[in-house]
Image (spheres, rainbow, N blue to C red):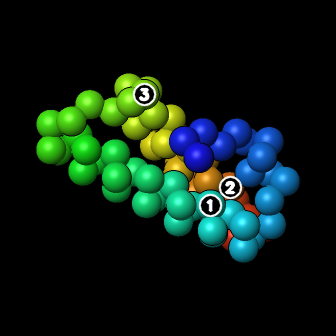
Amino acid sequence: MTHVSSKDIGEMNQSQREETLAELLDEMLQLRSQQALGGSASNPGSYKQTRRSIARMLTKMNQEKED
């Protein structure tokens, strides 16, 4: 699930966004635990991509709240 594009986020409804956000947060937790234990991720850029996808998701959700 590492990367979710802005276009994909725009096409989702609120419940799908919440579900995807929960999955991304779980994935981020796993990546952090791997990093803390000294293991290397299979994809070194996945941490950054996941973090950015979470930020995109939260931004879109906050914009929806304001409207």
Label 1 or label 2, whichever comes before in sequence order? 1
Q: Which residue is mark 1?
A: 20
Q: Amino acid at mark 1?
A: Thr
Please tell me whether residue 23 is drawn above or below residue 9 in the rendered image: below
Label 1 or label 3, whichever comes before in sequence order? 1
Give residue 15's quadrant in the image: bottom right
Q: Is residue 29 left or right of residue 51?
A: left
Q: Residue at x 80, y 66 (%)?
A: 13
Quadrant in which the C terminus appears: bottom right
Q: Secondary structure at mark 1?
A: helix
Residue 14 or residue 61, whichever sits in front? 14
Q: Secondary structure at mark 2?
A: helix
Classed neighbour count for the residue bearing mark 1: other residues with Cα under 10 Å, few (<14), some (14–19), many (≥20): some
Q: Amino acid at mark 3?
A: Asn
Residue extending farthest to the left is 37
Q: Which residue is mark 3?
A: 43
